[in-house]
Amino acid sequence: MSATLMDGKAVAARMTAEIASDAAAFQHATGVVPHLVAVLVGDDPASAVYVRNKQKACEKAGLKSTLHRLPTETPEADLLRTVEQLNANSEVHGILVQLPLPKHICEQVILDAVVAHKDVDCFHPHNVGLLVQGRPRFLPCTPAGCQRLLAEYKIETAGAHAVVLGRSEIVGKPMAMLLVQRGAVADATVTICHSRTRELASIVRQADIVIAAIGKPRFVTADMVKPGAVVIDVGINREGDKLVGDVDFEPVSQIASAITPVPGGVGPMTIATLLRNTLTAAQLFAG
Ligand code: NDP
């Protein structure tokens, strides 16, 4: 492997330590302990692991976390009521509804119901609007985690061609939006690709920075990557009991100048950003 390994686990640990110190200072000044509530509906094992990891990370940073577990068959109206109660609870600063929700529940309805100043996932239209305008209240967790990795490894983004694979609301679109803003670790020329993109491989080959977020194991192969490109792999795919990304890691790491591993790359950065957003939410509440 010739590429630099972008170690998300190590960077996230540093971020968590920073957040712990900021949260302690905040608590000292205000008496408030930032409190994240995770709502988990159903018994999807992967979702349960994600929520547990987020709770463990909260503990490490000195934030309070509470889990609301609801059965799969919970009616949409009951889940809405839970969200409204959390919105109204002044001891709750951040609300996280773990996705995916069971099929009978409309995710959009639930996510829109989370009040904007507790929306630590940055999904609310108000928060997305602020992000698009370059004055975010909260940072989109996974994209901001990728951006922080670019910053930590001193990757030049100004004027670089960044190709984002995927156009989801959670990763692709906000990732493109962060990179196209004016300012540090941004100012990139951004192309977004999706399942209807023509000549996708030739577009990816033009990229100085590739962000892969499509959910297809090893989709980005070595022949699609320009020598020296930086490759960020957001994908989490299960192959048996192994996790693999959207990038064919071994061959691509021979060609790229820097690359994130899966696991241990973007995943921990996503969680660290969620903690930062929870502290921000508590600070907004106190202020
Ligand atoms: P979605 O399924 O919501 O979106 C996938 C996107 O990829 C869509 O825009 C889709 O296009 C596009 N796509 C799918 N197949 C192709 C293809 N063959 N060629 C080009 N584009 C394609 O996924 P998410 O954005 O939620 O997640 C993407 C991956 O990232 C998943 O593996 C997920 O597990 C992982 N993930 C990891 C996180 C982390 O913290 N590391 C956090 C969130 C997600 P179209 O819109 O046309 O359908």
Image (cartoon, rainbow, N blue to C red):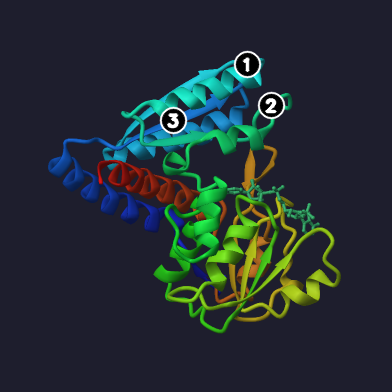
Q: Position of residue 200 (x, y in %)?
A: 80, 69
Observer-nearest residue: 156 or 70?
Answer: 70
Q: Residue, x 44% and y 30% (percent of image)?
A: 87
Give yes or no for contact between labels 3 and 1 (Cβ–Cβ under 8 Å): no
* Apparent side of residue 208 relative to residue 150 in the rendered image (left or right): right
Question: From what the image shows, is residue 226 above or below residue 264?
Answer: below
Question: From what the image shows, is residue 75 above or below residue 223?
Answer: above
Q: Residues within 10 Å of mark 2 (few under 14, many from 20)?
A: some
- Identified by mark 2, the residue type is Ile
Query: Label 3, label 2: how many angstroms apart (C-alpha)?
Result: 19 Å
Judging by the rendered image, the residue that carries numbered circle 3 is 87
Question: From what the image shows, is residue 276 above or below residue 6?
Answer: above
Q: Residue, x 31% and y 46% (percent of image)?
A: 284
Give yes or no for contact between labels 2 and 1 (Cβ–Cβ under 8 Å): yes
* Apparent side of residue 155 relative to residue 42 in the rendered image (left or right): left
Give yes or no for contact between labels 3 and 2 (Cβ–Cβ under 8 Å): no
Q: Residues within 10 Å of mark 3 (few under 14, many from 20)?
A: many
Judging by the rendered image, the residue that carries numbered circle 1 is 74
Q: Residue, x 45% and y 53% (percent of image)?
A: 269
Observer-nearest residue: 196 or 251?
Answer: 196
Question: From what the image shows, is residue 123 above or below residue 210?
Answer: above
Nearer the camera: disc 3 or disc 2: 3
- Identified by mark 3, the residue type is Asn
Query: Label 2, label 1: how many angstroms apart (C-alpha)?
Result: 9 Å
Observer-nearest residue: 239 or 121?
Answer: 121
Q: Residues within 10 Å of mark 1 (few under 14, many from 20)?
A: some
Q: Residue, x 54% and y 28% (percent of image)?
A: 48
Q: Secondary structure at mark 2?
A: loop
